[in-house]
Image (cartoon, coloured by chain):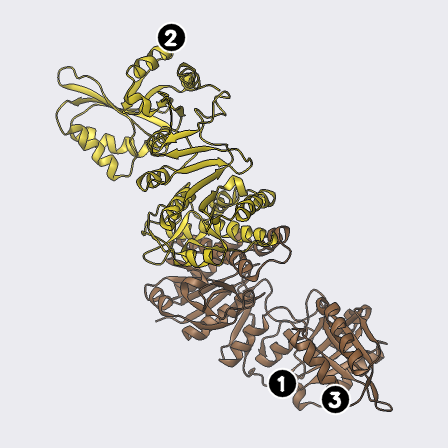
Chain colours: A brown, B yellow
Amino acid sequence: MGKLIVQKYGGSSVANVKKLKNVANRIAFYVKRGDRLVIVVSAMGDTTDNLLSLSEQINSSPSNREMDMLISTGEQISSALLAMALHKKGIDAISFTGQQIGIITDTYHTQAKILKIETERIKKELKQKRVVIIAGFQGVSTALEITTLGRGGSDLSAVALAVATGADMCEIYTDVEGIYTADPRLIPEAKKIEYITFDEMLELAARGAQVMQTRAVEVAKKFNIPLHVRSSFSKKEGTIIMEKAPYIEESVVRGVTLAENEAKITVCNLSDKPGIAAKIFDKLASANINVDMIVQNVSHKKITDISFTVPKSSVSKTIRISKQIAQKVGAGEVLSDENIAKVSVVGVGMKSHSGVAAKCFAALAKNKINIDMISTSEISISCVVKKSSGKAALKVLHSVFALKK
Amino acid sequence: MGKLIVQKYGGSSVANVKKLKNVANRIAFYVKRGDRLVIVVSAMGDTTDNLLSLSEQINSSPSNREMDMLISTGEQISSALLAMALHKKGIDAISFTGQQIGIITDTYHTQAKILKIETERIKKELKQKRVVIIAGFQGVSTALEITTLGRGGSDLSAVALAVATGADMCEIYTDVEGIYTADPRLIPEAKKIEYITFDEMLELAARGAQVMQTRAVEVAKKFNIPLHVRSSFSKKEGTIIMEKAPYIEESVVRGVTLAENEAKITVCNLSDKPGIAAKIFDKLASANINVDMIVQNVSHKKITDISFTVPKSSVSKTIRISKQIAQKVGAGEVLSDENIAKVSVVGVGMKSHSGVAAKCFAALAKNKINIDMISTSEISISCVVKKSSGKAALKVLHSVFALKK
């Protein structure tokens, strides 16, 4: 019996009829090789955006339940069309919605979490030598409603299906050839990474790389399912994401990222007593605001400033909440700065190599790029700089760690 | 407790965002009046045609199962958007696919028949004072697959839902103001019919009127559910289709129709023995060819010609089958003529008024329109004429039975 492979094709891979036929050709290749295939598809190109635009014209704050009813159709369409394309090539295939196949989720519409996947029907269809096509990004809740898994949710569908079916491999097809040492649109000399660990990938994604959905990588890590991120338009191998990369000599830094969608908030003149900072971040967390970097200055006379970054979309909510607390605890002004960029270097090699941070700071200083905030983890270093210096900083860091081709 | 009304809005009524909002306004009017509403929607305007065109580009003979997966999305989209439009107006509403609500069908994909409708969820939602929106045209088969009910299937969804829920009324909204004595695009002086019987409506539909789906009318007749066909763009009353029209003085003819999508097939020189004709029509029926008029000439010397009409789309199949049989039974040539039109007059009043047929033939003759085939039923008379005379024949018949405004 052939290998069981889960393949996920993103929206750009099935953007139009021609590309969809190309995907069918690729699947045919694997079928002929004897593999058993479970295919997960995203909606075609801008289908989802078109549906969102329709709903926006009708109701600017639509109910999440109806939003799921609406946008889940995109993947149903591409799945059915892909089945037709395979039939045309004489390959037996059958498409399913998330609901039909039994991707069971919780009831959080538009952001549902997968609880369980039924595999009976999948196994039955695979036994009949059929390619099983499953609409990505969607499931059915415990309340029997259609749910979706949030942006990039098809990645999660694929990984979860790979886990549930005990697949030998999970391939994520996209319009780039893999994970790069930096965004190739910004750094043309960026190099494709052959192997990367789950932790590095999570760190890259958290720091701004947009290739894989974070939750999907987390699930792959949890169940130790290696992922192969590769292009649907090329036969080349892409990037393997796995527990431990099989390097002979570990490189220190795996990649660098730039994030321009965050803003810096500063609460001034806080008294430097235990529990004050916690109050702010508790409140922000319960308002679902995603705080990233937090920096507290050394305090003088028991008075301190605290700065943190949040997504730009949350700025006004963050300021409102921070001001309320500042007033309560007798702190000073709340300032915001949207004119920032965050550059990060990521790599598990840092754990055993000291001096990576120093090298970062020196390189930026040498290039006259001023660092506004710094935060480090075991496998990453992030610096906030002026927005106008962001791209230059990325270039400097990419070059100083010798990530070029 | 208010009246329970099933309203069906066709594709033209929800063709774009503006029209969809108009439908929401109309529904709001009924909600405020205190009615309880079950809404059935078709796909927006040309959504279905766009999906069919995509599938055509991929596979010219797609599997029926995948076709149903594909085209059922159109109604899911319009249902969700309508729910959002109602929410925007502060009206509680919830949308469902046919599968979710439990419209159980047989397994004949693209042409499924409704077997049963679950009403538990509908009743629960109505009790919560919610408008229940149901995607028309679709259901779920006994094999748990998504099915569709064939062209115009949303009418059938509406009527079946009215039956299942014991609705007080079933309204069919469309882009015309009701049923007319003739197609107003062909006969501008055609008049809206106030009341029409189920039988007359079925006869009109069978003879070429395209307002209501035939199966929907059959089901309404079977369960005696009056239908109100009306415009979603006007407050005017439309046409009521019911068991017995409440006329004081019965008019003889209710309407006239023109059908141009049929062809005439003639099998020549058949021996006039019992069972020969049956052989032909048995074979055609088992090939799913819809034979309409059948005319057999008076036979001379035990040899006869038999002519019948079939949809133009079935002509080549019909000729192939007819030739096989003709050869077997020693008959002559098989001829076909696509250059025909069928005009019909329909009305239950004919039953009690003799001379309607004679009046037809005389009027056509007076206008030098030659009749090629004639067939009559209790409540209709149809004549096949040359295609070029079709419209003129329609006008003559509309005028001779005084159907004008």
- Badge 1 and badge 2 both on one subunit: no
Q: Secondary structure at mark 3?
A: loop
- Closer to the camera in the image, A319 or A233: A319
How far apart marks 3 and 1 lie (CA) works out to 16 Å
Residue A319 visible somewhere in the drawing: yes
Instruction: Tell me residue A113's x, y (percent).
Output: 52, 71
**Image mark 2: chain:** B
| Extreme residue toward the front, this view | B1
Instruction: Tell me residue B249's x, y (percent).
Output: 37, 21
Residue that appears at 59% across and 73% down: A214
Label 3–label 1 contact, CB within 8 A: no
Amino acid type at mark 3:
Gly
Q: Quadrant of the C terminus of chain A?
A: bottom right
Between marks 2 and 3 in the image, the one whose residue lies nearer the viewer: 2
How far apart marks 2 and 3 lie (CA) works out to 106 Å
Q: Earlier in the sequence, mark 3 or mark 1?
A: 1
**Image mark 3: chain:** A
Q: Which mark is residue A355?
A: 3
Between marks 3 and 1 in the image, the one whose residue lies nearer the viewer: 3
Residue that appears at 30% across and 25% down: B379
Q: Secondary structure at mark 1?
A: loop
A339 left or right of A251? Answer: right
**Image mark 1: chain:** A
For residue B396, above or below residue B131: above
Mark 3 crowd level (few <14, some 14–19, many ≥20, 10 Å Cα): few
Residue position marked by numbered label 2 in the rendering? B366
Q: Quadrant of the N terminus of chain A?
A: bottom left
Number of numbered discs visible in the structure rendering: 3
Residue position marked by numbered label 1 in the rendering? A250
Residue A237 visible somewhere in the drawing: no
